[in-house]
Image (cartoon, helix red, strand yellow):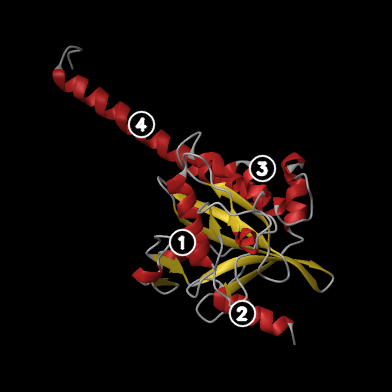
Amino acid sequence: MNNESPLKAIIVVTATAFLCSILVTIAAVTLQPIQRAYQDLELNRAIVGISGLTERASELSDREIISLFRDLEARIIDLDSGKFDTSYNADTFDTRKAAGNPELSTAIPAQQDLAKLGRRSRLVTVYLVKDATDLKRILLPIYGKGMWSTLYAFIALEPDLNTIVDITFYEQAETAGIGDLILRPDWQASWRGRKLYDESGTVRFQIGGAKIEPATLAAVYQVDSISGATVTVDAVTNLVRYWFGPHGFAPFLGAFRAEASR
């Protein structure tokens, strides 16, 4: 075939494109398990960081993080019933995938969908931190829509199931230098000691709002806002209020608290 033939040029371009697509596919398939393993490790590091098992999770080796993560007791809870569920393996259950499975998820009533999720998994994995048989902390996943992205976090509660002992946002894509300041360690540290519910069981937690004097009773429910990040921090308030409301963890926490008091 003539080297200057248009047909030959088309064949060469097509063959090159086909070969490149094969190489890209092979690379994607090969790297996917590695990427997933890295993502899981970083999530494990974030969870260990608020577990109370170490104060230097960011400095530990991957092996040390895995070892501490295995000390946590992973359990699956059924949000609808408020009880633990043993039908699935808590170490491998994927809540995100379950949210898209009609059999494992539920639509969120519009009036309750403060986190703007549409649907949520009926089952979620939580982590218990225990000393012998006594509960030291419980780590709960929370997430919801921010300004530009879905915000994912884990929040740690003290044994009273009301006082926040720590929080970590481990995935977000908010505005750089503004909304992503929710990742600042000092801001996350300001959550410690804040409470979710008042004495009547109403979710009172909020970020920002009217200026409250630190010495007042209302201050225990409030975290200072982040300047310029109003949309993101309002979204954080709403996702916290959703997840600790009646369509979120409230039934489970009530049942768990009652069981512990027996």
Q: Amino acid at mark 2?
A: Gly
Position in image of residue 187 (x %, y %): 62, 45
Q: Is residue 230 left or right of residue 61?
A: left
**Residue 122 can be seen, yes or no:** yes
First-in-chain label (2 vs 4): 4
- Badge 2 is on which residue? 254
- Badge 4 is on which residue? 19
Q: Amino acid at mark 3?
A: Asp
Please report the residue visible at 74 percent of the width from the left and 45 percent of the height from the top.
57
As drawn, the label of residue 37 is: none
Q: Secondary structure at mark 1?
A: helix
Q: Nearer the viewer, residue 78 or 256?
A: 256
Q: Quadrant of residue 102?
A: bottom left
Could you tell me how far apart the alpha carbons at marks 1 and 3 are, in whole angstroms? Answer: 32 Å
- Badge 1 is on which residue? 97
Q: Amino acid at mark 4?
A: Leu
Please report the residue visible at 69 percent of the width from the left and 55 percent of the height from the top.
192
First-in-chain label (1 vs 3): 1
Label 2 neighbourhood size at 10 Å, few (<14), some (14-19), many (20+)? few
Tally of marks: 4
Q: Amino acid at mark 1?
A: Lys
- Badge 3 is on which residue? 186
Position in image of residue 193 (x %, y %): 70, 58
Q: Quadrant of the C terminus?
A: bottom right
